[in-house]
Structures are given as structure tokens and as C-alpha cells.
Image (spheres, rainbow, N blue to C red):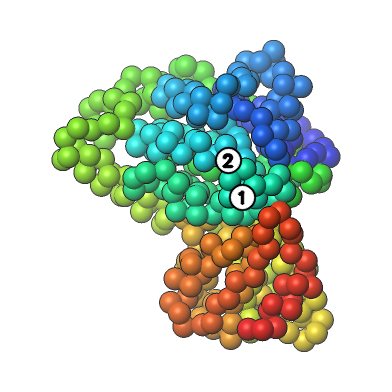
Amino acid sequence: MKELRLMKGNEAIAEAAIRCGCDGYFGYPITPQSEILEHLMKEKPYENTGMVVLQAESEVASINMVYGGASVGKKVMTTSSSPGISLMQEGLSYISGAELPALVVNVVRGGPGLGTIQPSQADYFQTVKGGGHGDYRLITLAPASVQEMYDFVELGFDLAFKYRAPVMILTDGIIGQVMEKVVVDDYKPRWTEEYIAKTYPWAATGKTKLRERNIVTSLYLESARQEQLNKTLQAKYKVVEENEIRYETFQCEDAEYLLVAYGSSARICQKVLQLARAEGIKVGLIRPITLWPYPTKIIHEVGTKMKGILSVEMNAGQMIEDVKLAVECKVPVKHYGRFGGIVPTPSEILDALKTL
């Protein structure tokens, strides 16, 4: 039976993990995502579902514990905020190279360096372009509500196991801390060893349909083997790009101008639409839900018909590169954003829109 709860975004992440049958959480506290670990400790799922909840000694330890759990087909995850995610980059590259499923949540705060504990979207490059080494990609989901924080946990695990790849939920301190109504699901049982052996034989036996053996490693001393791994990864990423693009559009049918924004910035931009149209400015909004794979095609189709595009981000202009690539410089594209944890207001964005 579904249940209606009032929860913080961080709490929704934790509750979703418990209810979707997660096997293990390994994390380390850091603001503004510490409520995830706190909620898990409070709920004690290890007494009811058997889910392991462990505060590791560091973020580096956390991601390597995830690596170990993923190696045997377990639904495992970690969460952190920007500086902590920086420490996890090596592990994310290893997990990607080993073709293992894992879920990672980044509740972004301002930077660079230790920065501020206030919200930001300045980790777009780190996540979407790949903060670790090598030619790997992270499937990246960008929630814009507490409900999506909850929903994207199970979706993230589904995508991770479907493609044997790490998935990132890229959110920020606004959505992590805000409280909203959330519809939560019934508890789902954790996978049995028999289910894993039948559904994901690579985890239980090391056998796959693609290879006779699956040695869990990202190390290939022979260049030919390393090249073949990279070819395998790129072929997989192409399939992801063909099948997993998600986005949302608002009032684009008659629009003359376009806003592109994700996460909490997209929430603010919905108010901008109301203000702009009240002044007779026809503006629409595209909200990328998957930041990778990026909704390039829809932005091209819609954006190239516009007089101008404004990329709204709480950073110095990171996603704007992908917006410009999508429209192939056929339309003027500008950026508006605030830094250091300052959240832009709808009126500020409207003023920037008028400069297009």
C-alpha cells in the first residue's frame, strides 16, 4: 500500500533505498546531505530488511566498499556532497571500467575547494564530463522535486543493473533540504542469491553472454585488451544514448525564447514563465532530466526555432556548452547564474531573458 509522507529530499533518498530493497549503503557525513545517513541510522533497516548501513572512515573507503558490493551483484549505493564526490572519482572510474552497477548521489554544494554548505550546480562538469580518468560516462539523473528524489533511487538501480554501469543522481542542497509531500511505495524484498544467479549470472558465476569469463577488474596490461574494453564501453554508451534520454518541456509550442535549466533552477524557471508571459514575452522551458545522456535532439528541434536561448544554472556556465552544441550556434545562447550558494530569483532571470 502506498503512503503519503512529508519528507526532506535527503530523507526521501534514504527511505527509497530502504523500500526498494537496497542491500548496502556506505557513506560519510558531509553537509548538505548528512540527513541521508542520519535517516538510515534512525530507521535501522538492518533490523528489518537486512540492509547494511555503514559509516565508513572516509569517502574513499565508501566508494571502494560500493565497488566490492557491486562485484557480487548487490544493490549498493553511497551519497556525498561535492568535495566528497571529488574524493570518489578514482573509484567511479574503476567501477565503470569493471562494468559494475552502483548508485551514487551528489547533493551539490558551492565550491571550488571546501567552498560553502549552500546549494550549487557547479558539479555539472565533474559528473557529466567525467571527473575521473579514462573514457567513461555516468548515467546522470537530475531530480527537480522531493518526489523525484525518491523515484530516482529505484530508477537509478534499474539503469545501473540494466547497463552494468554506475548511475549518479545529481541534485543540490535546495532539493536535499526542502520538505514536500512524497508518495512512498511498499517495501520490496531484497534480492535472493538465487535471483541474482538467475538474472545477473555475471555476479554469481563470473559468466556472461558476451564473454566466457568476467574477471572483476579495470586493469588490462595488454593494450589490445584495454582497447577492446573501451570499444565495449563505447558501444554500451551508444545504446544508453539511444534509449534512456529523459526531459520535460513547458509551453514550448508558441515560444519565441527558450530557457534550459535542470534541477532546482528548472523549478525557479517555471515561475519565470509565468512572469514573462504576463508581460507578453512568449518563453518556453526545457528541463533535462538525464544530464547524460543529454537531450540534444529535442533542444535542437525546439531551440533552433527560437530568437534566443538562456541557460540558467547555479554556476559559471557549464551546461551552456551542451546547449550551444545542440543548436549548432544557429541561435544566440547566453548564460545566467549565481555562485557561492546564492540562489537566483525569478525576477533576476527574467531581466536576463530580456537581454537576449
The answer to which image quadrant residue 341 occupies is bottom right
- From the viewer's perspective, tell me whether residue 271 is left or right of residue 229: right
Please rate how many residues cluster around mark 1, counting C-alpha atoms within 10 Å: few if below 14, some from 14 to 19, many from 20. Answer: many
Count the marks. 2
For label 1, the SS is: loop
Whether tag 2 and tag 1 are in contact, CB under 8 A, the answer is yes
- Seen in the picture, residue 337 relative to 140 is either above or below; the reply is below
**On-image quarter of the N terminus:** top right
Q: Give the vertical position of 107 relative to 38 (above or below).
A: below
Whole-percent x and y of residue 178?
A: 79, 46
Residue 31 point in image, percent of width and height? 70, 38
**Between discs 2 and 1, the one toward the N terminus:** 2
Q: Residue at x 72, y 48 (%)?
A: 118
Give the answer, above or below, for where 274 lies relative to 340: below
The reply to whether residue 236 is visible in this rendering is no
Instruction: Say which residue label 1 marks.
Output: 111
Tell me the quarter of the image containing the C terminus: bottom right
Q: Given the image, on which type of amino acid does mark 1 rest? A: Gly
Q: Is residue 316 left or right of residue 208?
A: right
Pick the front one: 199 or 109: 109
In the rendered structure, find residue 320 and report the number of the disc placed on it: none
Q: Write the residue at 66% across / 84% down.
A: 355
Q: Position of residue 327 (x, y in %)?
A: 47, 76
User: How far apart in space, not on screen, are marks 2 and 1 (Cα)?
Assistant: 8 Å
Q: Which residue is mark 2?
A: 83
Element type where label 2 sits in the image: helix
Amino acid, disc 2: Pro
